[in-house]
Amino acid sequence: MMIRKKNLAAADYPLDVKLGQMLMVGFRGATVGECQAFLDRVGRYHVGGVWLTDNESPMGVTLGNIRSPGQLKEIVSELQRVAVIPLFVAIDAEGGQVIRIKEKYGFPAFLSPQTLGDRNDLAFTHEQAALLASTLADAGINLNLAPVVDLNTNPAN
């Protein structure tokens, strides 16, 4: 069923579509060729979202989805193209050590929230947040899994 063409209300979706929309899944591969089977399943099972990562195996084999800004935009565009309903495209992009879009892949450097807090410069923090938001949006990422409140209560940190 082509949900987009019929313009159904969510309550009118068939059960299999509703179930698929509840799933956010990760996958291996960074190119259409590397993850074609997964791309086929996104549309077939009405997946609601995907989670992107940059993981590497202990043997140095890339299992993740991120290699460069252009490549990331291409794979996200293909994911959205095959989706029956537009996907949530999620990533961990907190900043500092917790960032999947790293400098080594050609993305800007992003400071950690603690570094921004220590700097205590609201305008600079706003600039950094805007840069991160625009970088994610340019890649087609529409959900950042960074914490809203992350309290550092360990005095040893």
Image (cartoon, helix red, strand yellow):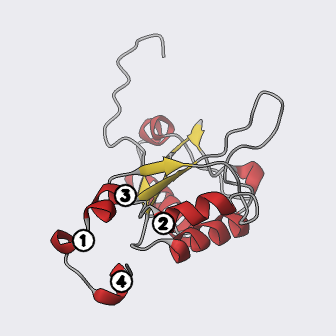
Q: Mark 3 points at which residue?
A: 20
- Which callout, 3 or 1, points at the residue further toward the start of the chain? 1
Residue 157 vs residue 109: left or right?
left
- x then y, percent, for residue 51: 51, 50
**Cα gap from disc 4 to disc 1, whole angstroms:** 11 Å
Instruction: Give the number of the mark in front: 4 or 1.
Output: 1
Q: Distance between the residues labelled 2 and 4?
A: 14 Å
Mark 2 vs 4, N-terminal side: 4
Residue occupied by mark 1: 13
Does the CB distance between marks 3 and 1 fall below 8 Å?
Answer: no
Q: Relative to residue 96, is residue 129 depicted above or below?
A: below
Give the residue type at disc 3. Answer: Gly
Q: Is mark 3 on a helix, strand or loop?
A: helix
Query: What residue would you read off at disc 2?
Result: 44
Helix, strand or loop at label 4? It is helix
User: In the image, is 5 to the left or to the right of 30?
Assistant: left
Residue at the image point whose x is 43% and y is 66% from the top: 87
Query: The disc labelled 2 sits on which kind of residue?
Result: Arg
Residue 1 against residue 96 in the figure, above or below: below
Counting residues from the N terminus, which is met first, the one under dot 3 or under dot 2?
3
- The structure residue drawn at horizontal position 37% and vertical position 41%, both measured from the top left corner, is 147
Q: Which of marks 2 and 4 is in front?
A: 2
Mark 1 crowd level (few <14, some 14–19, many ≥20, 10 Å Cα): some
- Measured in 3D between alpha carbons, the distance from the residue under mark 3 to the one under mark 1, in whole angstroms, is 11 Å
Instruction: Tell me the crowding category of disc 2: few under 14, some 14 to 19, or many 20 or more residues within 10 angstroms, Cα based.
Output: some
- x then y, percent, for residue 25: 48, 49
Task: Say if mark 1 contacts mark 2, CB within 8 Å.
Answer: no
**Which quadrant of the structure image shows residue 38?**
bottom right
Q: State yes or no: discs 3 and 2 in contact (Cβ < 8 Å).
A: no
Instruction: Give the camera-side residue of 75 and 148.
Output: 75
Q: Which amino acid does label 4 sit on?
A: Arg
